[in-house]
Amino acid sequence: MSSAKKATKKDDSTSVVNADVVTLPNKRQSVSPATRYKDKSLVDRLKKSGLDPQRLLDLALPKTTTKANAKTRHFLIILGFIFAVLTPALAFTGYMFFFASDQYHSSAAFAVRSSSAPAATEILGMVLGGGAADSATSNSYIVNDYIQSQTIIEDLSSDVEIEEIFNREGTDWLFRMGTDLPIEDKLAYWNDMVDVSYDSTSSVIYLEIRSFEPEDSVLIAEAIIEKSEVLVNELSEVNRRESVKFAEESVARAEARLKAIRKQMQTYRQETQEVSPEAGAQIAVELLGGLDQEVNKKQAQLDTLLTYLDEDSPRIRILSQEIEALNAQIASVRERVGSGTTAGGDAANLSARMSEFSELSLEEEFARQLYTTSLAGLEQARQDAMNETIYLATFIKPTLSQAAQYPSRFLYSLAVFCALFGIWLVSVLMYYNIRDRT
């Protein structure tokens, strides 16, 4: 009896659930207007309550279609991982370990030095980072940039067959240079195979070359050092020429100035007809003194004669005329010295001539001293140019490798796998993000 009741209750509950499920709208069944209105009111009440009728329907109905879509999607993702990540990574790893050619490196180290000893006045500049230290540092940077430039490839082409070295027979196609490349691609490949670095603390340039044969690496390293030494010698020669050239230009300017001043002095003497106005002034002063004494003497005689002779006497008239002549001569001399004016203007004025002559003499003396100093500077520049030499000091000669150090097969393989895995992971995440938003 109890079993029958339980069965009856179970059937009732099942019928209720089925009834609820059946009451949901179905496009394939014919639904009466009353039932459609009742279902619509039920949907409205569910939406007001914050429930999604379609989601309730999905929960009530079987999920066979959703599960099938999920399985297909997961299968495609795994398949994409196999073909987009695993297969290329394994292929590249196999190429690196079985086909990639061995690479041998050669290391060297050198520095740019100067043979001239610094003067006592330059020691403080060297301590503070100037003077000869700046010159060596700048030349080191020049050499460092030269090794990484297109110029060194062009310079080495006459001594070393770069394309032949980096395209040896039997080398793999991935790491070889290739033929008939533009200079930009050659430079990019060169910078990949030639590693150069400059240590500013020790002023040392470190060089490492990789190639497919140990002897080729040593050959390239020796050629690079040789061309760098030629460049340093050219820089030293240019430095010497520039320093001497600047001193020679200074001497030429000082000499031209001295010649111009001396020409002005010559023109002045031709116009004034005197070697030195100062000597003429001294003569004029002595003449004035003598004339004054003569006038005073004549005047004393005149005063004495006037005490007992008449003014109209011949002797008194002659003595008066002599005094007037002496005074006229004194006035003329004073005008020449500069105590008065003259119709000749400044050219006839001894004071003006003395002032002009003093200026010319001062300029001539300054030009003479400048010329002497420039000559001394030129001799010093030539001496410094002979003593100062910039040279390349190689203290680690190119080494000959006995075992291959490159390429880094494991690191290259790991890098390719990580790159492919990252691309695949980003693609999957983008897919799920777009799927969730639609």
Image (tube, helix red, strand yellow):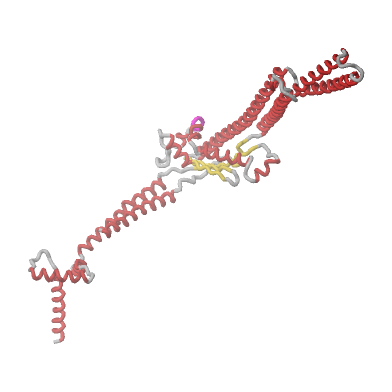
Left or right: 47 as drawn, with respect to 164: left
- Tell which residue pokes out farthest to the bottom in this image: 1
Q: Is 183 situated above or below 43?
A: above
**Between 108 and 102, which is closer to the camera in this rendering?**
108
Q: Is 392 situated above or below 288?
A: below
Q: Is 303 situated above or below 20?
A: above
Q: Is residue 150 visible?
A: yes
Image quadrant in which the C terminus is located = bottom left
Expressed as whole percent of the image width and height from the top left, the position of residue 28 reads 10, 64
Left or right: 380 as drawn, with respect to 26: right
**Between 192 and 248, which is closer to the camera in this rendering?**
248
- Tell which residue pokes out farthest to the top in this image: 314
Expressed as whole percent of the image width and height from the top left, the position of residue 241 reads 61, 29
Left or right: 118 as drawn, with respect to 147: right
Expressed as whole percent of the image width and height from the top left, the position of residue 206 reads 55, 43
Rendered image quadrant of residue 329: top right
- The magenta stretch is 156-160
